[in-house]
Amino acid sequence: MSAPVRLYATRSSNNPAVTLYNSVAKDVAAEPSGSTPRPQRSKRTQPEDDGGANSTISSVGKSGTGRSAKRVKVERVANGNAEDEVTSPKQEVKSPRPKAPKKQKPVRQSLDTPHPTPEHWKEQYETIKSMRARLKAPVDTMGCDQAQNGETDPKNRRFATLVSLMLSSQTKDEITDAAISKLRAALGGSISVDGIIDAEESTISQAIDKVGFWRRKTGYLKKAAQKLRDDFDSDVPKTVDELCSLPGVGPKMAFLALQTAWKLNAGIGVDVHVHRITNRLQWHKPPTKNPEETRLNLQSWLPSELHGEINHRLVGFGQTVCLPVGPRCDLCELNAKGPERCPSAQKVVNSKNRKTVVMSETAYTDVGPKVEIKIEEDPIAGPSTTPKLGLANNTGADEDVVGIKESTQDALPM
């Protein structure tokens, strides 16, 4: 059976009054005589793995300013429904690669070449020690070692010390001490690992919102407490590297936490006061650029028995006399001994409007653990010749020490 015939009428090009008829098959496209064939877009079919749907892709050239830009129109046909979308030919959907955990670098403990010992360091340090014994500084009554006094459980005492150190960054001791008190009250009377984990972030934030970077520190406290419970049996670690693995804990905090919480001397805790004062005394040649450089220099030559106390002494000295701006060189005894003892001494023009600094004629309780010798008598053998040592300011780490006493001094008005 022949295909159906369709007639097409066209006017004659020679005589417009004459009509011509043409017959063509149904599947053949008829073009008007004398007309130019229309250009067709190039089409190609590209199979896609779209669950059995057919996709037809047509490329269209689009001229730009001297550069050709391509636009690909993708027409998806699935289950009889057409769905159009425009995509870039270079755009590829890639699954995100899982980030490898950042490997923690161990804290450096020593220099390859020790720093030379400063010539007058001992006299300078003894002079500062003498002044500090007669000065009452904020760190003496509101430092990180005071945070544990509100706790009874040994783990909570150590954790409260760590929390105080984490909050103290870029924050004055007075504000940190107040934040610790508010946080303890907000957690029900005790600062513990479980208490921090169970508390809402808003509760912690409201308690510490006066310290520097309190939003970030709120997250640090939550994450650190979780890591302590998961990895360290809800207790403060005993090594510097383990402490530095906690979010928000750096080398300075780690060394001070070990000294205060565990009575371990692993190194020197260097903060901005220690960094500033030791550079003013020219103990570093060339001058150090950051606290870590200062720590490594000091640890290379300073006797290890002074590592645990130098932070407390110099911090208090920096809070009262050797201030970062406008130091009270008029009160400093190093200044009176000449430029060799304080090469950075400044001339104080007007000290009348400055805050009063009271230096007592007698020494306060010495900084750091005070060793007392106590002779115990045996009722049968008589007086013992073996002394027993006790710490005057017990912090809870050594509950079995014999002869423990606590001495407190009221702060003088500053």
Image: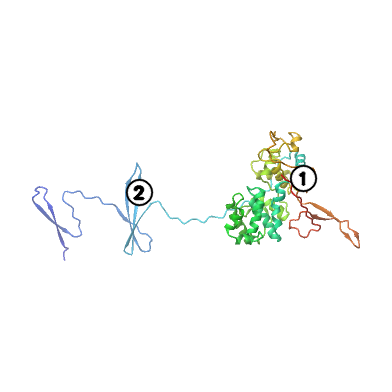
Numbered disc 1: secondary structure = helix
Identify the mark nearer the N-term, 1 or 2.
2
Q: Quadrant of residue 192?
A: bottom right
Quadrant position of the C terminus in the picture: top right
Q: Is residue 212 left or right of residue 297?
A: left
- Is 269 drawn above or below residue 77 in the view shown? above
Q: Quadrant of residue 247?
A: bottom right
Query: For the view shown, which residue lies furthest in the bottom direction?
Result: 1
In x, y percent, where is residue 239? Answer: 68, 54
Residue at 67% x, 56% y is 160
Q: Is residue 162 visible?
A: yes
Foreground residue among 352 and 347:
352
Quadrant position of the N terminus in the picture: bottom left
Numbered disc 2: secondary structure = strand
Foreground residue among 47 and 128:
128
Foreground residue among 162 and 239:
162
User: Given the image, on which type of amino acid does mark 2 rest?
Assistant: Lys
In x, y percent, where is residue 26? Answer: 19, 60
Residue at 60% x, 60% y is 199
Q: Is residue 297 visible?
A: no
Q: Is residue 215 left or right of residue 64?
A: right
In x, y percent, where is residue 246? Answer: 62, 55
Q: CA distance from mark 1 to mark 2?
A: 80 Å
Residue pointed to by mark 2: 70
- Looking at the rendered image, the disc whose residue lies closer to the viewer, 1 or 2, is 1
In x, y percent, where is residue 274? Answer: 69, 44
Q: Residues within 10 Å of mark 2 (few under 14, many from 20)?
A: some
Q: Residues within 10 Å of mark 1 (few under 14, many from 20)?
A: some
Residue pointed to by mark 1: 133
